[in-house]
Each structure stands twice: as structure tokens, then as C-alpha cells.
Image (cartoon, rainbow, N blue to C red):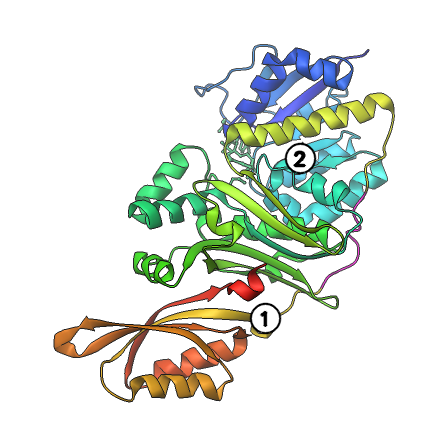
């Protein structure tokens, strides 16, 4: 059996683990692909850098052409991250007739459909299991195991770094920046952690999953997104008093004529599967009309779990190449799916207000909400600054139209008795959570 020679673009947190598995578990890879697979060449930015793993059989290069234009290299693995030059390199590899395995969610969320179509025309494959949920088998689950279903909803904790930060803040009282630094040290965070903290990474992953689950092309820029920077430890305590945890929720729903996609911090009932997701773990709750509810849970970040998905893709790919089969189910990425504008979405809300501590204030607040058809589900009031007669008012609403919730916040802010609204978060209420 002829050796399949692999070119690896990137030898960072994930790339090092992939290189190590390909070289140090050669027998496993050979046995499972039916013949030898050799890591031939590795692209890096700085060839002199100290590495956690230095490939023994492969040459390091700083020139991508030595991989992309080498006819002897049969498979390209892209683990550089970022949009460019990663997108161009993937395109060049496909154009040269080389199948590609990538973990790059930014590229796949924005350009996945066109790259998959280009690959189809060139008769090669693009595998991207590692782009969503690290080591959790999500893409293959949607592409194969759940194909008999109409998927109606996905609720997920899909970014390890933000879950790690939230968990450290809520459970250990850690400061945001310390928790982020620890997530970076452990190799969970993106090279630019803004992608994690501001919710971009989760929005890219939700776009990729929804493209496959809902069968259509989704514009990642249309996904509503809020990050975790504004979270205040006091809200973790109030949420817990009301029976909720806080998570960065990635939520997608197929409404038929349009899809709802949003990423934002949310209160999640303590009884919900996602409330039990701690550290950098990820979980995805999928609802299908035939299967019912499915939960996928595991390590969504880190070099080793992600390498598990990457090398799994390489094995599947090389086995298919050797068998001469191209029987992977292709996803319809041509049908554009309209994303529901955020104002039209219905969601329950948590508001924390600073108000004057005197009679009639609660009635004023309730009237504004009531006039907009927003019904209150729970209220907490705490004295804030006794000498200034100020109180902290926490309100949980039943689901309401986002546009009306926005108007309510504007009208509340304009009240003389409302000093500020330091927190506005969405909530999944128990009745709609499962
Ligand atoms: P990383 O540690 O920053 O490694 C990136 C690697 O790519 C480095 O070896 C770097 O070279 C090389 N590189 C970057 N830009 C380059 C350029 N222009 N030319 C040549 N080489 C370049 O990143 P990572 O954490 O391994 O992530 C890799 C990919 O996996 C990203 O798409 C990421 O989103 C995705 N991913 C990561 C995780 C995770 O937990 N880390 C999980 C799932 C998916 P030098 O070493 O010489 O600087
Ligand atoms: N930075 C990402 C996360 C890596 O924290 O989830 C996995 O995609």
C-alpha cells in the first residue's frame, strides 16, 4: 500500500498534538487506514521557536508552497487559525486536488459553503469536525447519525474559554482577567482571546452547526452576538437565588421560513443539562423530530481533544481515499436561510435595576412592562444604599418580544426613579428549556 504523505499547516497547541499522534501512534493510524501515513512537512511562522513537540520525521518549513505545491503531498491539515492566509491556503490545496482537514471555524463559518462547493467540483473532500466542539463528535453526528430528522432546536455551551471564566467567577469568585489568563495558559483560548470573550468563536461554531443541522447557508454576520465581558458576580448570586446558573448560550431554532440564531449570556435553570457544564467543557442539546433530545458533552477545547477530532478526520479521509470511495454525505449549502432579526425573537429576560427606595416605584416599573405586554415571573428587592434610599430590584420576566424588551429598557431608563439598569440578560425559563 502506497504511503499517504501529509502536510501540516501550523504546529501550535493543536498542531503539536496532531503531529505527535501521527508520528508516535503510527501503528494505530496504519492499521485504521489500511496502510502507512507519513507526516512529511510542517509549516510554521518561526522555524527556530522552542516546540512542545518537534516532529522527528517531518521537515519544518516557513514556505507554504513547499506543501501546497508538492505533488507528493496527498492531504493537507490546516491548523494555523485566523482568516488569512488560512483561507487562501485551504483554497490552494483544494485547487491542487488535495483534500483538506481543518479546525478553523472562522474560515468555515464565513467561507465553508464556497470551499465545500469548490471541493466538490475538484472531487476532493474538506473535513472540519474539529472546528466545532473540539473533541466532541458533532459534525459527523449531524451529517450522518441524525440525517433522518428535522432538527428543530440546538442549545449549546460551545466555547470552552468563556465557560471556564464564568465557572471560575461563579464558583471560586475569581476575577475575570485572572480566569482568562488561566484559560490561555491551559491552551483553551484563541490566539486573540477577544474571539472567545466577545462571543465570536461561539457564533462561528453555531453558524457551522446550524448550516449542517438546518440544511442551508447561514450568514455568520447575521447571528446575534453578545460576549461575557459585562457579567457582574452579583448576577451569579441573584441568578442562583432564583434557581438559575449563567452560561454563554448558543441557541438556534428552525422556524421553517427563517432561523433564529443567537449567542449571549443567559440564565439557565439549574435543572437544565447545560447548567451542569463546568470548566472548559462543552455540551450541545439537539432536538430532532424522530430522535427526541440528544445530548453531546465533552472537552470542547484544548490540544489533545481537538487533535482527536483532527486525526479522526484524517483516518476517515485516508481510508476513503484508499478504498477509492467518495461516499460522504454532502450538505446542501446552496439554499440561503434567512436569520430572524433579534427584535422579533421571543425570550425571557432578567433585569437588575437601581431604583429609588420609596412607595410606588415597583408599580411604575410594572406598568411600563405591563403596557408592553411583558409579564413578570419573579421579583427580588434588596436595599442598596440606605442613606440614599436606593434599592436593587431584580425582575425575571416571562418570554416576550426582544423589541418590546428593548423599548421597556428605554422607558425604564427615562424614569426619574430608576437610577440605572446595570444588568440585562436573557433567560431560558424551565417550561421552554427542554
Ligand atoms: P496556535 O497555538 O496559535 O498555533 C498556530 C500555529 O500556526 C503556530 O504553529 C504558528 O506558527 C502557525 N502559524 C500561524 N500563522 C501562520 C502563518 N501566517 N504562516 C505560517 N505559520 C503560521 O493555534 P491553535 O490553538 O493550535 O489553533 C489552531 C486552530 O485550531 C485554530 O483555527 C483554532 O481556532 C482551532 N482550534 C483550537 C482549539 C484549541 O483548544 N486550541 C480547539 C479547537 C479548534 P509558530 O508556532 O511558528 O508561531
Ligand atoms: N477557543 C476555543 C474555545 C477553542 O475556548 O472553545 C475550541 O474551539
What residue lies at 28% left-to-right and 48% top-to-bottom?
A: 173
Residue beneath disc 2: 89
In the image, residue 133 sits, relative to residue 322, either above or below, namely: below
Residue 345 badge? 1
What residue lies at 83% left-to-right and 21% top-to-bottom?
A: 322
Q: Position of residue 101 (x, y in %)?
A: 68, 32
Secondary structure found at label 1: loop
For discs 1 and 2, the disc positioned in front in the rendered view = 1
Mark pair 1, 2: CA separation: 38 Å
> Can see residue 193?
no
Magenta range:
330-337
In this orientation, which residue lies closer to the viewer: 70 or 113?
A: 113
In the image, residue 14 sits, relative to residue 374, either above or below, namely: above
Secondary structure found at label 2: helix
In this orientation, which residue lies closer to the viewer: 78 or 431?
A: 431
Q: Quarter of the image for the N terminus: give it.
A: top right
Locate residue 342 relative to residue 268 in the image: left or right: right
Q: Is residue 147 magenta?
A: no
Q: Earlier in the sequence, mark 1 or mark 2?
A: 2
Some atom of ligand 2 lies within 8 Å of the CB belonging to the residue at label 1: no
Amino acid at each position: 500500500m502506497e504511503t499517504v504523505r501529509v502536510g501540516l499547516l501550523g504546529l501550535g497547541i493543536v498542531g503539536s498534538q496532531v503531529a505527535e499522534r501521527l508520528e508516535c501512534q503510527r501503528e494505530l493510524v496504519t492499521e485504521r487506514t489500511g496502510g502507512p501515513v507519513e507526516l512529511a512537512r510542517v509549516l510554521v511562522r518561526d522555524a527556530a521557536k522552542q516546540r512542545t513537540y518537534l516532529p522527528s520525521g517531518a521537515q519544518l518549513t516557513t514556505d507554504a508552497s513547499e506543501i501546497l505545491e508538492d505533488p507528493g503531498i496527498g492531504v493537507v491539515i490546516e491548523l494555523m487559525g485566523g482568516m488569512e492566509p488560512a483561507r487562501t491556503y485551504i483554497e490552494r490545496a483544494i485547487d491542487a486536488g488535495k483534500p483538506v482537514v481543518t479546525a478553523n471555524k472562522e474560515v468555515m463559518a464565513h467561507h465553508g459553503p464556497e470551499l465545500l462547493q469548490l471541493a466538490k467540483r475538484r472531487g476532493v473532500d474538506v473535513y472540519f469536525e474539529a472546528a466545532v466542539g473540539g473533541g466532541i463528535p458533532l459534525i459527523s453526528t449531524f451529517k450522518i447519525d441524525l440525517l433522518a430528522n428535522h432538527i428543530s432546536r440546538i442549545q449549546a455551551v460551545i466555547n470552552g474559554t468563556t465557560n471556564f471564566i464564568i465557572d471560575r467567577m461563579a464558583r471560586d469568585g475569581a476575577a475575570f482577567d485572572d480566569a482568562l489568563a488561566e484559560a490561555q495558559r491551559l491552551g483553551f483560548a484563541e490566539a486573540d482571546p477577544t474571539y472567545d470573550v466577545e462571543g465570536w468563536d461561539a457564533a462561528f461554531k453555531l453558524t457551522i452547526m446550524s448550516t449542517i443541522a438546518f440544511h442551508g447557508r447561514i450568514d455568520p454576520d447575521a447571528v446575534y452576538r453578545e460576549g461575557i465581558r459585562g457579567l457582574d458576580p452579583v448576577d451569579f448570586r441573584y441568578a442562583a437565588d432564583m434557581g438559575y446558573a449563567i452560561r454563554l448560550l448558543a441557541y438556534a431554532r428552525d422556524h421553517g421560513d427563517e432561523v433564529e440564531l443567537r449567542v449571549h449570556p443567559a440564565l439557565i435553570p439549574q435543572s437544565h443539562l447545560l447548567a451542569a457544564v463546568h470548566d472548559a467543557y462543552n455540551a450541545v442539546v439537539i432536538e430532532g423530530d424522530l430522535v427526541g433530545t440528544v445530548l453531546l458533552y465533552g472537552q470542547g477545547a484544548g490540544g489533545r481533544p481537538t487533535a482527536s477530532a483532527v486525526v479522526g478526520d484524517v483516518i476517515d479521509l485516508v481510508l476513503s481515499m484508499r478504498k477509492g470511495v467518495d461516499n460522504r454525505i454532502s450538505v446542501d449549502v446552496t439554499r440561503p436561510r434567512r436569520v430572524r432579526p433579534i427584535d422579533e425573537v421571543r425570550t425571557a429576560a432578567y433585569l437588575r435595576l437601581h431604583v429609588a427606595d420609596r412607595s410606588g416605584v415597583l408599580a411604575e416599573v410594572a406598568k411600563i412592562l405591563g403596557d408592553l405586554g411583558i409579564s413578570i415571573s419573579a421579583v427580588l428587592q434588596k436595599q442598596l444604599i440606605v442613606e440614599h434610599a436606593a434599592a436593587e430590584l431584580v425582575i425575571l420576566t416571562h418570554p416576550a418580544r426582544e423589541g418590546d424588551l428593548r423599548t421597556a429598557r428605554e422607558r425604564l431608563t427615562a424614569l426619574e426613579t430608576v437610577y440605572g439598569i446595570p444588568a440585562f440578560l436573557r433567560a431560558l425559563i424551565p417550561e421552554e428549556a427542554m
